[in-house]
Amino acid sequence: DSGVTQTPKHLITATGQRVTLRCSPRSGDLSVYWYQQSLDQGLQFLIQYYNGEERAKGNILERFSAQQFPDLHSELNLSSLELGDSALYFCASTPDPMLNTEAFFGQGTRLTVV
Amino acid sequence: ELKVEQNPLFLSMQEGKNYTIYCNYSTTSDRLYWYRQDPGKSLESLFVLLSNGAVKQEGRLMASLDTKARLSTLHITAAVHDLSATYFCAVARSYNTDKLIFGTGTRLQVFP
């Protein structure tokens, strides 16, 4: 168990809908990262938050947004869902980017858009 | 743009044999990570390599980093079935963010 908790584990929804994925980082970790894993794109970095503020952005679609709350948990919001958004979404956390530690990953949320 | 390439993409090997997975990256970085992923599961950290010449070993796996060649290797010694998984290398780009750029992954199957 990495200490990173993601909910829900599975999500099935229809095209055009909106969903929210939740992530609780390891205790004491200030940075949260979101990654998308799909068969055609591999593992792609989406966005990073550090202590409540956006720190880095990857190839995240405009239909997707995220935030990190004062208690450091994070949510990834996916809207106007398309079939191609079906993927495994991972959250990871680290204590501080300057510490050069590895990122610990949650179990992921498997999103299926039908 | 930082790119990370792994080869081979797929590796089928017999138990007891040795093999090496290669990870090349396109721009300067001094931080490289190796992860393991079982099918449908999360990513498990294996190694963190932070400097040129770094070598780390855990059981039958050994990882090394050559920052001048922008190359990392993951060497498997005397493979066993339990090592069957997908292995990813990942590179961190800068020191104010740990965002990882992942390689394509190497799917390893070890058979008797």
Image (tube, coloured by chain):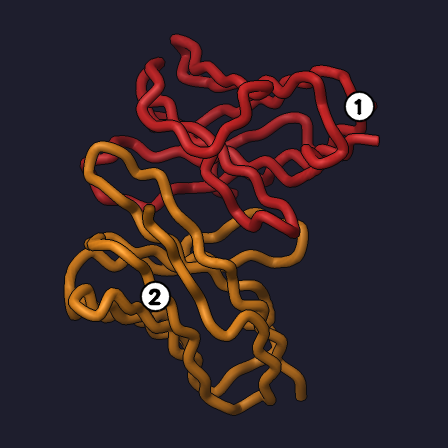
Chain colours: A red, B orange
**Which of the chains bears the disc numbered 2?**
B
Q: Is residue A42 visible?
A: yes
Neighbourhood count class around disc 2 (C-alpha, 10 Å): few under 14, some 14–19, many 20 upward: many
Task: Calculate the distance from the C-alpha at mark 1 to the C-alpha at mark 2.
Answer: 38 Å
Q: Is residue B50 above or below residue B81?
A: above
Q: Is residue A67 above or below residue B63?
A: above
Q: Is residue B56 visible?
A: no
Question: Does residue A76 appear to the left or right of A56 in the view shown?
Answer: right
Q: Are marks 1 and 2 on the same chain?
A: no
Residue positioned 59% across, 36% down in the render: A89
Residue positioned 29% across, 56% down in the render: B32
Residue positioned 27% across, 44% down in the render: B93
**Which of the chains bears the disc numbered 1?**
A
Rendered-image quadrant of the C terminus of chain B = bottom right
Q: Which mark is residue B39?
A: none
Q: Which mark is residue B24?
A: 2
Mark 2 residue type: Asn
> Helix, strand, or loop for circle 2?
strand
Q: Which image quadrant for residue A101?
A: top left
Instruction: Residue at the far top: name it.
Output: A70
* Residue wearing tag 1: A15
Image coords of residue A95 (percent x, y): 29, 32
Question: Does residue B101 appear to the left or right of A95 in the view shown?
Answer: right
